[in-house]
Image: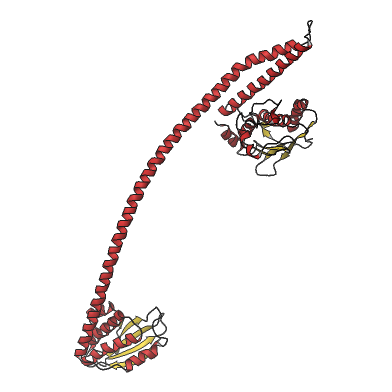
Amino acid sequence: MTEETASFRLSSAQEVFGLRRVAQQAAAALAFDQQDQVRLATALSELGRDRLGSPDLEVTFGLDTTAQPNALVVAFSWRGGTPPRQETLDLVARLVRVEHRAGTPQSRLLLTHPLPRDGAWPDDPGERLAGALDTAAPSTEADDLRAQTRDLIAALDETRAQREELRRLNEELEETNQGVLALYSELTRELETTNSGVLALHSELEDKRRQLQEASEAKTRFWTNISHELRTPVNAVVGLSRLLLTPGPSPLSPEQQEQVELIAASGHTMLALVSDLLDVAKAEAGHLEIHAEPVDIRLVVTHLGGLLRSHAEGGVRLVLPPLDDAPALVTDETLLVRILRNLLSNAMKFTERGEVRLDVTADPDVHDRAVIFTVTDTGVGIPAEEIDRVFEAFYQVRGPHQRGRPGTGLGLPYARTLAELLGGSLSLTSTVGEGTRVRVRVPDLDRPGAHACAEQEERP
């Protein structure tokens, strides 16, 4: 809805000059900027000249308060006569929004221009507009020309200022572009240098990896050959010592008996060392094959008990679980027995009094079926700083507890290697003077995806 504020009759060129002045004053009162003031005044002046001479020509100023934002509306109305020239309408349309409504008997031209969006216009634009229209002073053609000249000069000044600002911005943009190009070139050079370094490092790492692989293969071949070469004479020594200890027609003297028993014990120790070396070499070379089948854990525990109870020293008890309801497990029974035998014999070796206990429980994770074997002892324990190192091949924690306890330092590394080959894990916690706890998690290879996991662990 348009609220009309004031109307003017246009019947002479002098009144058209006055219309331009009124338009500028109205635009200024509504807080239009300088460009919008000139734009509105020019549009009304051009339409006034075009419509001058039309019957009952009248110009009405008003505000459209329904538009968002509110808008200034200027209406030209007349009766009959020729329609506005299209050239004039096109020119005015470049300055403000214009709408031609031809009708009988009255025709109208509506010019609409929104009030400033930034809220700079007054709280009551209607009163401001009415005040500006009431105080509009008459003007002459000379006044109008001078006003147009001032507007033109102001427009030229503004255009010049904009051109200077544009030139300055272009210079800044050019400097920025040069800086960006320089930075891009520098980053490109640095990236090329970095890539060259990465390629050189990758090549060096590949050479090191190949050297390490060759060294590992050479070490494995060496231990394999040495183990095979030593096994035959050691077996001969063990067999001959057993033969000498057999009662016969010519019994040995007590001193000879003791010496032969010492030879037999040393032979057994040497044979165990050779067997451990051969097993470790096979594991590192990936020659240990996994034969998964259902395992009767009760038989495994019974077998281990019969094998190891005789090795327990006085004051040390080997505690095994009853396993009335043993969990089901599909894995390689031979490798499982080797793991548990190594852990139990190692625990009994370094426990002077107390107990060595084996516990067997099912993993509570129903989505990843597994059995957990836990070996706990009350032995000497391992210092915290040594725990990671005990899994290094041939490493042994030095101390008084080593006296009279021969070993190779291969038991724990070998047990962990076998556990990982089965797709499981082995972890160790220990406290000096209190004992050691080793936890072995063996997954059920009958579960989906377990064979793939174990095969991946088995690859060298």
Residue 205: name its quadrant.
top left
| Residue appearing at x 44%, y 32% in the figure | 207
Residue that extends furthest to the front in the rendered view of this protein: 400
| Residue appearing at x 25%, y 83% in the figure | 42
Is residue 97 visible in the rendered image? The answer is no
Say which quadrant the C terminus sits in. Answer: top right
Could you say which is closer to the camera, residue 423 or residue 328?
423
Q: Return the x and y of residue 7 as percentages of the image width and height.
A: 32, 92
Q: Is residue 8 above or below residue 195?
A: below
Residue 390: name its quadrant.
top right
Q: Return the x and y of residue 28 as percentages of the image width and height.
A: 32, 85
Residue that extends furthest to the left in the rendered view of this protein: 142
Asked which colour scheme the image uses, the reply is: secondary structure
Q: Is residue 413 above or below residue 157?
A: above
Residue 175: name its quadrant.
bottom left
In the picture, measured across the screen, residue 57 lies left or right of residue 345, that is left
Q: Return the x and y of residue 147 as percentages of the image width and height.
A: 23, 86
How many numbered discs sit on the rendered protein? 0
Q: Return the x and y of residue 457 as percentages of the image width and height.
A: 58, 34
In the picture, measured across the screen, residue 292 lies left or right of residue 197, that is right
Could you say which is closer to the camera, residue 330 or residue 377?
377
Residue that extends furthest to the top in the rendered view of this protein: 249
Could you say which is closer to the camera, residue 443 or residue 419?
419
Say which quadrant the N terminus sits in. Answer: bottom left
Is residue 229 visible in the rendered image? The answer is yes
| Residue appearing at x 68%, y 25% in the figure | 406
Could you say which is closer to the camera, residue 232 or residue 24?
232
| Residue appearing at x 60%, y 32% in the figure | 392
